Amino acid sequence: MSFDPDLSLELALYQEGYRILAGMDEAGRGSWAGPVVAAAVILPVEREDLLATLTGTRDSKLLSARQRECLFPLIHEVALGVGVGVASAAFIDQHGIMPATREAMHQALSALPLAPSYLLIDYLRLPTVPIPQRGVPKGDQKHLSIAAASIVAKVTRDRLMVEMDERYPGYGFARHKGYGTPQHREALDRLGVCAIHRLSFAPMRTLA
């Protein structure tokens, strides 16, 4: 199976009259600490050299940190609009991870400089948003707009977690970005939870 996304769906929708297509994805949904971050990216899908210009753009999980950092400014340069939203660990604890993910996506949409006419979202749908949309399983592996959004969300969140590493030293946030690694578990046993841990997630529930 190829993991190189294409523009087939975007171009089909463009031909149907949807001229401003926003791809959307999130990062950090399964992390033990830190926010969930969502991104919305509007690409000029009619641009003939778009695939060539964004060569290497794919699901952020299939890229190295260096590759993502190289693609991040290129996506911003090429895109017609980029929006980012953040839902904190406290919001996640209060409302749950899926409502928090949708909240971050709502923020990302609001941050776009253009109003999208269609949304392509990895897995999810946004029921309260009155814009035509499609939730696509493994969309970040199939469609360039969603893949670009996955990179923007991941790089933005990783940078936030590096900042959190300086604010809350000892947990290794710069390395594991808040995910449930053995290093993170050892730090929790040694230091306990901090302000950006998701207390509603195991194992923090037993440590809080």
Image: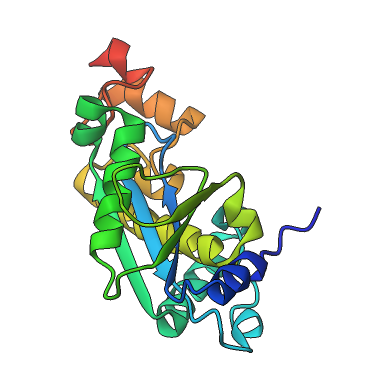
Residue 72 position within the rendered picture, expressed as x and y whole percent measured from the top left = 45, 72
The residue sitting at 49% across, 81% down in the picture is 44
The residue sitting at 24% across, 55% down in the picture is 107
- 100 relative to 105, above or below: above
Residue 41 position within the rendered picture, expressed as x and y whole percent measured from the top left = 42, 68
- 193 with respect to 45 (left or right): left
Residue 73 in sight from this viewpoint: yes
- 140 with respect to 205 (left or right): right
Which residue of the protein is positioned furthest toward the right in this rendering?
Answer: 1
Which residue of the protein is positioned furthest toward the bottom in this rendering?
Answer: 48
The residue sitting at 32% across, 43% down in the picture is 102
- 91 with respect to 176 (left or right): left
Residue 35 in sight from this viewpoint: no
Q: Coloured how?
A: rainbow
Residue 151 position within the rendered picture, expressed as x and y whole percent measured from the top left = 49, 62
The residue sitting at 64% across, 55% down in the picture is 141
- 166 with respect to 177 (left or right): left
User: Between residues 154 and 165, which one lies in front from this camera angle?
Assistant: 154
Which residue of the protein is positioned furthest toward the front in this rendering?
Answer: 16
User: Between residues 64 and 41, which one lies in front from this camera angle?
Assistant: 41
Q: In terms of image quadrants, where is residue 98?
A: top left
Q: In terms of image quadrants, where is residue 114?
A: bottom left
Residue 46 position within the rendered picture, expressed as x and y whole percent measured from the top left = 56, 84
Image quarter of the C terminus? top left
